[in-house]
């Protein structure tokens, strides 16, 4: 428990576990971008649930910064957002009545210095402190302006309560812009006041990776190059780029998913046990993984990466357009909607073990997984019979239906020593509202001052420095491989995984 926290533990709906979580001290929760999409889809539903179950102190207030609207109109917008994105919450009148009095508005634009002054005036001392969390649900180009505005209005110093800044990815678009952003923010806030959200780290199933690794003694002896052939970490999506063409055209799948979410997951899979479960101890270990990642020469990049773009096709029984036919996408765009990269971690534990990270939009299935493929049995005792034992696999399903699947070989029943694969499943949670839960977990961590699940500035810069040569190599390409939407037809993946036992692992649900 940190010094700002206190109060009785309360039953929370976090992961529906019935566990006790601590109620954070009262806080002024300030949202920049109070009418934006992130606020409507994720933040408001999460805050409403958190308040209801006691994760947010009842004396807390939620201050939305917006302009050209009245407070009543803003409330209406939030309600409409709930109706659209969280219908169950929208129907819950009791929760809404409880939530509404906490919502206050501060009028003004982000570039208006008087707004920050009004915000300073609006911050109340709650309990005995003027704690504040500043959530930037705004485009990243505004982060520095907001930090400057807060600073000028005297809202950064922590004399009368904590001040925490929350920002969302993308943290820059390459190494130079990421380090410039870090410098700008660190000129105003101390590093431990900055919380960089990667919502993947807030997912129950991602945190569970750490528990599986470090709360079970049977895992550690196997968790290395002696037993593991390779690891595939994947986020396969069926959605396209939705309404975000302008962002995505300049981003592509490598920046959007691999540099951030997937590399973060890889660090958790590969890191050494931290000396304690604290923010800096965990982040130090993650950082060591990033530093040990092999850098590729420019002429090696094509060998270790794959990029592709979706053509039209059928997804979930419906015809969908090609990426280049999406609104606001250039008809000759070569932006990748599928990206894969093979990493090597040059340290004692992982030397020679490929980590294949891949992600794609408009794929055949929506599944995110970490698949650990073990080496083949060293010698096939049962070779005289028809079946050759398959290499074992341990799959951490991140979503949907989070859980763990272990594939082992077992004897076929009857007068034979032939074997067949037996699939052992332990699906530990249903994930009806997982994305919102990730925000609940992460905002609760901000309120309690726990930075363990947030990225530190050095991690961000290190991961950019690793993908940067790939971005450079891809920058001027004119041709990009296409795959039919709703399929796994990315031929280059077979080549990328040809030395991996079992080849490209295409995730299937209900296996
Ligand atoms: C976001 C990406 O960070 O993560 C999106 O910008 C992607 O493109 C999303 O769709 C995936 O998140 P989730 O939680 O749905 O797997």
Image (tube, grey):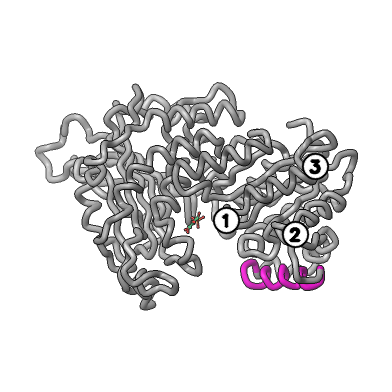
The residue sitting at 85% across, 36% down in the picture is: 160
Q: Position of residue 391 (x, y in %)?
A: 25, 39
The residue sitting at 65% across, 70% down in the picture is: 87
Q: Is mark 1 within 8 Å of ligand 1?
A: yes
Residue carrying label 2:
65
Contact, mark 2 vs mark 1 (Cβ under 8 Å): no
Is residue 266 visible in the rendered image? The answer is: yes
Q: Is residue 213 magenta?
A: no
The residue sitting at 46% across, 49% down in the picture is: 173
Is residue 20 visible in the rendered image? The answer is: no
Q: Position of residue 183 (x, y in %)?
A: 58, 37
Q: Is mark 2 within 8 Å of ligand 1?
A: no
Q: Earlier in the sequence, mark 2 or mark 3?
A: 2
Residue bounds of the magenta highlight: 71-86
Query: In the image, which is nearer the foreground, mark 3 or mark 1?
Result: 3
Residue carrying label 1:
435
Contact, mark 3 vs mark 1 (Cβ under 8 Å): no
Q: CA distance from mark 2 to mark 3?
A: 17 Å
Q: Position of residue 455 (x, y in %)?
A: 55, 39
């Amino acid at each position: 428990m940190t010094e700002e926290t206190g109060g009785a533990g309360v039953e929370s709906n976090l992961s529906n576990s019935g566990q006790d979580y601590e109620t954070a001290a009262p806080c002024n929760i300030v949202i920049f971008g109070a009418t934006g999409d992130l606020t409507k889809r994720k933040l408001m539903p999460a805050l409403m649930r958190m308040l209801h179950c006691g994760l947010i102190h009842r004396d807390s207030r939620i201050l939305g910064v917006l302009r050209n609207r009245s407070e009543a109109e803003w409330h209406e917008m939030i309600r409409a957002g709930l109706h659209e994105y969280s219908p169950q919450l929208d129907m819950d009148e009791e929760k809404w009545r409880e939530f509404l009095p906490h919502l206050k508005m501060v009028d003004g634009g982000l570039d208006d210095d008087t707004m920050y002054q009004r915000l300073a005036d609006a911050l109340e001392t709650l309990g005995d402190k003027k704690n504040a969390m500043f959530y930037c649900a705004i485009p990243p180009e505004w982060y520095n302006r907001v930090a400057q505005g807060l600073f000028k209005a005297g809202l950064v110093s922590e004399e009368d309560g904590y001040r925490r800044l929350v920002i969302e990815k993308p943290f820059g678009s390459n190494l130079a812009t990421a380090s410039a952003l870090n410098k700008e923010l660190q000129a105003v806030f101390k590093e431990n006041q900055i919380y960089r959200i990667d919502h993947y780290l807030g997912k129950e199933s991602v945190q569970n990776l750490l528990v599986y690794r470090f709360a079970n003694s049977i895992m550690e002896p196997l968790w290395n190059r002696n037993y593991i052939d390779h690891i595939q970490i994947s986020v396969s999506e069926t959605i396209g780029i939705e309404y975000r063409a302008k962002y995505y055209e300049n981003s592509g799948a490598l920046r959007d998913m691999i540099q951030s979410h997937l590399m973060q997951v890889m660090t958790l899979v590969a890191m050494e046990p931290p000396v304690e479960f604290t923010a800096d101890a965990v982040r130090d270990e993650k950082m060591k993984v990033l530093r040990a990642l092999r850098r590729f020469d420019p002429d090696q990049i094509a060998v270790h990466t794959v990029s592709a773009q979706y053509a039209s096709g059928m997804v979930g029984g419906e015809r969908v357009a090609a990426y280049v036919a999406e609104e606001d996408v250039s008809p000759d765009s070569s932006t990748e909607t599928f990206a894969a990269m093979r990493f090597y971690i040059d340290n004692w534990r992982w030397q020679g073990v490929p980590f294949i990270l891949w992600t794609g939009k408009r794929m055949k299935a929506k599944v995110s997984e970490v698949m650990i493929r073990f080496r083949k049995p060293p010698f096939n005792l049962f070779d005289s019979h028809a079946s050759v034992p398959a290499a074992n696999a341990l799959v951490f399903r991140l979503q949907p239906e989070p859980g763990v699947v272990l594939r082992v070989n077992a004897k076929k029943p009857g007068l034979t020593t032939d074997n067949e694969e037996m699939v052992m499943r332990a699906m530990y949670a249903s994930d009806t509202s997982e994305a919102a839960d990730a925000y609940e977990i992460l905002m609760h961590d901000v309120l309690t001052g726990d930075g363990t699940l947030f990225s530190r500035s050095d991690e961000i810069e290190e991961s950019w420095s690793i993908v940067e040569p790939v971005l450079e190599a891809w920058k001027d390409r004119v041709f990009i491989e296409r795959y039919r939407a709703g399929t796994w037809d990315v031929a280059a993946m077979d080549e990328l995984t040809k030395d991996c036992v079992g080849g490209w692992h295409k995730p299937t649900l209900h296996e």
